[in-house]
Image: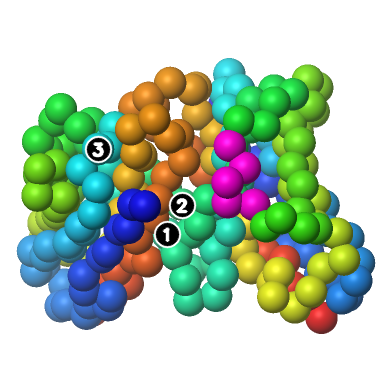
Amino acid sequence: KQEVTQIPAALSVPEGENLVLNCSFTDSAIYNLQWFRQDPGKGLTSLLLIQSSQREQTSGRLNASLDKSSGRSTLYIAASQPGDSATYLCAVEDTGRRALTFGSGTRLQVQP
Amino acid sequence: NAGVMQNPRHLVRRRGQEARLRCSPMKGHSHVYWYRQLPEEGLKFMVYLQKENIIDESGMPKERFSAEFPKEGPSILRIQQVVRGDSAAYFCASDLGGANTEAFFGQGTRLTVV
């Protein structure tokens, strides 16, 4: 059974810092890994999707990497801004199963 | 091009009542997924449907919960005889189907059982 873990559970940084969020998964047989953002009381916004054959994806100040063999992904946020404050969720789609397995998230607070 | 639409956004039910949650997928999407987010927990998969078919219901509680996605109209998640433990945010997602397609989520329905 796939399990997804995110570290740290919470993070508070001053504006302008570069930061790294970590995600690990127990079963490497995945189709892809997605990073989402969730604002309080809101839905999920997809940030990046990395297919199992890819090593990284970039969108603006965000860069996500995937090391499938070791079961790890990182989300790198450059030059953080207060508007980046949210919960960041990592989710994997297992091979042969369409459902996503989510981590419990990293709650990020960027101080102005 | 509207995204995934869920309604209602907030729903209050007394214990023992029924709750009906609706989800209209993104235009062109025929695959719908329901997830539940309990307070202070991550999202947990409940059920995966295509039009008129339940594909995977391995995450659905065995009793009181059912889901459908009819040929016409939205997908419905139905919870009968609600209990306080059903209080949660219920999210719907849709995609085009096939591996490696991006899932898009709705804003969720927040169910409170009093």
Q: Earlier in the sequence, mark 1 or mark 3?
A: 3
| Cα gap from disc 1 to disc 3, whole angstroms | 26 Å
Q: How is the image coloured?
A: rainbow
What is the quadrant of residue B110 in the picture?
Answer: bottom right
Residue B83, above or below B109: below
Q: Is residue B45 magenta?
A: no
Tag 1: amino acid: Gln
Residue marked by disc 2: A44
Q: Residue at the location (20% across, 43% down)?
A: A28
- Asked whether, in this view, residue B61 is left or right of residue A24, the answer is right
Q: Which mark is residue A38?
A: 1
Q: Position of residue A70 (x, y in %)?
A: 9, 49
Q: Which residues are magenta?
A: B56-60
Q: Nearer the viewer, residue A95 or B50?
A: A95
Q: Earlier in the sequence, mark 1 or mark 2?
A: 1
**Subunit under mark 2:** A
Q: Position of residue B89 (x, y in %)?
A: 61, 63
Numbered disc 2: secondary structure: strand
What is the quadrant of residue B86 in the picture?
Answer: bottom right
Q: Is residue A62 visible?
A: yes
Query: Dots 1 and 2: beta carbons under 8 Å?
Result: yes
